[in-house]
Amino acid sequence: MIEVYTDGATLGNPGIGGAGIYIKDGKQSYQYSIPLPSMSNHEAEFHAIIHGLQVCKEHFPNEILSFRTDSKVAADLIEKGHTKNIVFQSLLHTINQVSSEFPFFFIKWIPEKKNYHADKLAKKAIQHHP
């Protein structure tokens, strides 16, 4: 099972964003900082999850994925599988589509203090924004 910690951050809300992805594969770990365009903080959280899924699709196809996020909004909407929020609908659709390519995809809310690595990577992405 691959453990994926994701976090989205913005400089302002809305503001330029960053996605942080920290992946644990047994004793190996992988880190990604991805700059994002201007968006809301919640949108950045969804984009971090999407980028995490895309990394897993490329490097860990056919693995069981256990995602962790400190975004209760993102975790709850993904668990429900639908939303009335027009902005989140396309993001949720993308998450559902890409995650369906894996045998199992789980997402769990975790407290911010347990998402330290992903948070640091998201903030780093904002600092290195082009």
Image (tube, rainbow, N blue to C red):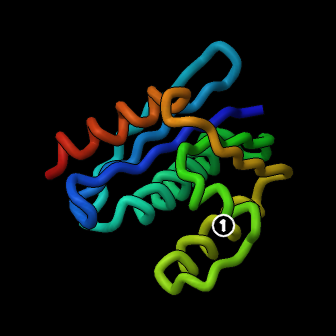
Residue depicted at x 71% and y 49%: 107
Q: Is residue 49 left or right of residue 105?
A: left
121 and 73: which is toward the camera: 73
Residue 99 in percent (x, y) is at: 71, 59
Q: Quadrant of residue 109?
A: top right
Q: Is residue 14 left or right of residue 28?
A: left
Q: Quadrant of residue 98?
A: bottom right
Q: Is residue 68 above or below residue 84?
A: above
| Quadrant in the picture for the N terminus | top right
Judged from this view, the residue extending furthest toward the right is 103
- The three-letter amino acid code for the residue at tag 1 is Leu
Judged from this view, the residue extending furthest toward the top is 27
Query: Circle 1: is it few (<14), some (14-19), or many (20+) Cα within 10 Å?
Result: some
Residue 25 in percent (x, y) is at: 67, 25
Judged from this view, the residue extending furthest toward the left is 130
Residue depicted at x 71% and y 33%: 2
Residue 59 in percent (x, y) is at: 61, 40
Label count reads: 1
Q: Is residue 120 left or right of residue 37?
A: right
Q: Is residue 10 above or below residue 33?
A: below
Residue 55 in percent (x, y) is at: 54, 46
Q: Is residue 66 above or below residue 77?
A: above
Residue depicted at x 14% and y 52%: 130
Secondary structure of the residue carrying numbered label 1? helix
Q: Which residue is mark 1?
A: 77
Residue depicted at x 35% and y 31%: 120
19 and 71: which is toward the camera: 71
Q: Quadrant of residue 101?
A: bottom right
24 and 41: which is toward the camera: 41
